[in-house]
Image (spheres, grey):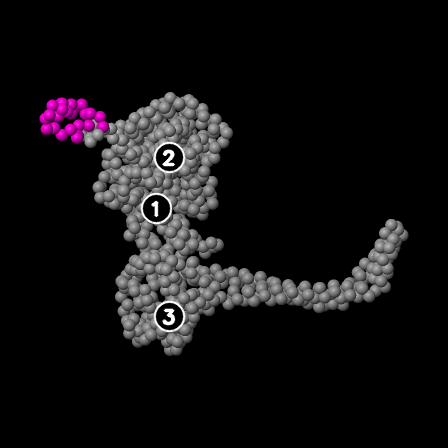
Amino acid sequence: MASLNVFPACRMRAFAALVTQELGVQVRMRGREICVRLGKPPIIFLPNLEYAREMDLLPIYGFCLHEAAHIAFTNPKIGAKAPNYLVKIIHNTVEDEYIERRLERNFPGARAMLTHAYVEGIKLVCGEHPVEKISYIAPEGRDKVLQYMKSVVGMDIDDAQLVEDVARRLEIERAAKLWILAARAYPIPLMDWESHPWRVVFEEATTPHARSTREAYEQALRIIERLGVRPVLPHDARPIEKISEARAAKDRVREARRLLRLARLEVEAEARKQSETTPEYAALNDAVERACESPDSAEAMVSEQQARDKYEEACRQIRAEVRERRASEIKTLAKDSSEKSAAARAAKAMAKQATELIKRRDAEVSPSVAKGAMEAVVEAQIKAYKGEGLDEELGTASSAKGDGEVTTTGRPGPDLSDAGKYMPLDRSLDRIEKIAATPSSKQAYDAARSTHARTIYETIERLRRLRSSKLTKIKHNAPEGRLDRRKTAAVGLGMAGAPVDLRHVWRALSVKNDAKVAMSLLIDCSGSMGGSAGSSGQTRIALARQAAACLAEVLSTLGIPHEILGHTTHDADAEKLEFAPADLETYSRVVPFRGYEFKSFTENAAVVSVFSDFPMQSNLDGEAVEWAARRLAARREKTKLLIVISDGMPCAEMSNSAELERHLYATAKRIEARRDDGLHLAALGIGEERVRSFYANAEVINAVEGLPAAVLGIVERVLAKIGSR
């Protein structure tokens, strides 16, 4: 059977998981841009383009891989020592080649992704010619140099030597861009690289290729030294000396404190030495000896205590004299330590400001061929993604099979006129919880099984007959078996001597191998499920729990692998996310998704935990259906059936309801488009007809007694195909 390709939304998440697995770099889907948080650990954030096409995602893959390679292979301490941005730029240019070669070894195929990403980004930002055609050191490029110097405050255009230095400074960046295009074989015009006077220097200095960040740094220094280029621009200053000064100030404080502590120890040692030469010390030793010889003598103990008091008094006097004699020395050392501590605190504050400036300027002075290319690519892809209509989106989903069976016509769907493409703010707080059974849930389960025993039995029998009728068949003209009554006349003629072939007059009952089936039940655990379910008098969640318990009993009896899942949200975790009020209009949902696992495929126990207490908040049905279907699609059975037990509409706090409905509708249609591959989707509405707006195969019940007919209505449209497989 063809592999199931149901979830294009998984591309981004699968790619993020692959980068994490292969490179050890955390990648999360968050927001509308690519960004890197250089914390512990560093994290790369990708935009939530869940249903974008593969060709649209390639540039984003490339940029993500490049940043991941920096995190995995770059030694940040080397680049942090760059004295100015001229060295920083050339070093990053050379080191990018090193990390991408390392990346290709750990992540085969990454180079092609990177090339595609850069070329797309370059074209978006710079067009077909990302590098200046005219050299800055050529006479015809002098006007551009002067114009640049005029635009920078404090540049003297009358100083011929300064003009020459600025021209060389600008040209080395241009040459670095040409070297990148040549070294990485980008399909972009190189202009005059082959005839460039600095080409040989770049090629010789970078041959052989750097094998570490340090070697790339040394190659960059050699290039700058051989070309004689100076960092003459005002923004070339990179205040790393402030960080060095702070470290030196900290060392000076440490040394001053060491000297102060040593002087104080010397004072104590001198006082102790003098006290051991006093008569009081000798008298104390004699008193201690007498006390040891006569441990029961009260007089000896009193004498020892008196001698000890006199000795301690003498020690205090000696200590005071020594401290007074060396007071000026201690005071000088303490003052020096205090002054150096204050200077170190000031240096630390300046270093902190310098560090923030370095980070900001490092981001501004990007070594990439096209500055801002990454942002431009992401912005363009999001614009195209958000502008795609629902018909086009579903058409893309069905194009993999080429049957065009998915349409938005037929059964009336939800009002999607104001809906946009689904884009969650953050998935990092989404979580799956295993629900445990409790004594009260065990009692509730036993009561439900006892109450609905007849319903369970009836459903088992009807499903068994349905499956049996499709798995058995009478085979005529069989070579052996029972006599086929329709062949009686032929047998009689044969016995009378007529030339009749009597080898195929039998009939046999052929039993086909049971086509493997797996089922999954997904329960809506939202707050709205606490409402009344029609005339039954029960709440919807109570009815859903009993229906799930009955279905689990039926499936267990029939030996059909199954799991029971639930879903809601965790609204309290939304407070941990950083978002602006405008984000509520930009993103489809802010609150985190929460999935419940009541029973997995690998468990044989009864689904008791479905009656346990668990939080019930909002419902993100589209994501829940996708999550359950993804788990079910991983099964090996030929036929897989997902039944959603819900009261209808998705709804969540701080979410766009129209986009939630669109996402559920589109997700359902994507799954239904792959039903010929064996994955089927159905819904069981609890007292609500609205489920029919989203699911093509849906039934509605208002009481558990309606379960057999509803389930048979769903299952017979699915299991009827088993006999023909």
| 166 falls in the magenta region | no
Looking at the picture, does residue 506 appear above or below residue 656? above
| Foreground disc of the pair 1, 3 | 3
The residue located at (44%, 67%) in the rendering is 214
The residue that label 2 is drawn on is 562
User: What is the distance, in whole Å, between disc 3 and disc 2 at their CAs?
Assistant: 59 Å
Label located before the other in sequence (1 or 3)? 1
Hey, which residue is sitting farthest right in the picture? 299
Task: Look at the numbered discs 1 and 3 and tell me whether their residues touch, using CB distance below 8 Å.
Answer: no
* Nearest to the observer: residue 556 or residue 290: 556
Density class for disc 2 (Cα within 10 Å; few <14, some 14-19, many ≥20) is: many
Q: Secondary structure at mark 2?
A: strand
Label disc, if present, on residue 10 of the rendered structure: 1
Q: Residue at x 61, y 64 (%)?
A: 254
Q: How many marks?
A: 3
Span highlighted in magenta in the image: 481-506
State yes or no: discs 3 and 2 in contact (Cβ < 8 Å). no
- At x 20%, y 25%, the residue is 483
Q: Earlier in the sequence, mark 3 or mark 2?
A: 3
413 shown above or below 49: above
Q: Quadrant of residue 199?
A: bottom left
Quarter of the image with the N terminus is top left
Tell me the residue at 39%/53% (across/down): 19
Q: Position of residue 428 (x, y in %)?
A: 43, 46
Front-most of residues 502 and 268? 502
Q: Quadrant of the C terminus?
A: top left
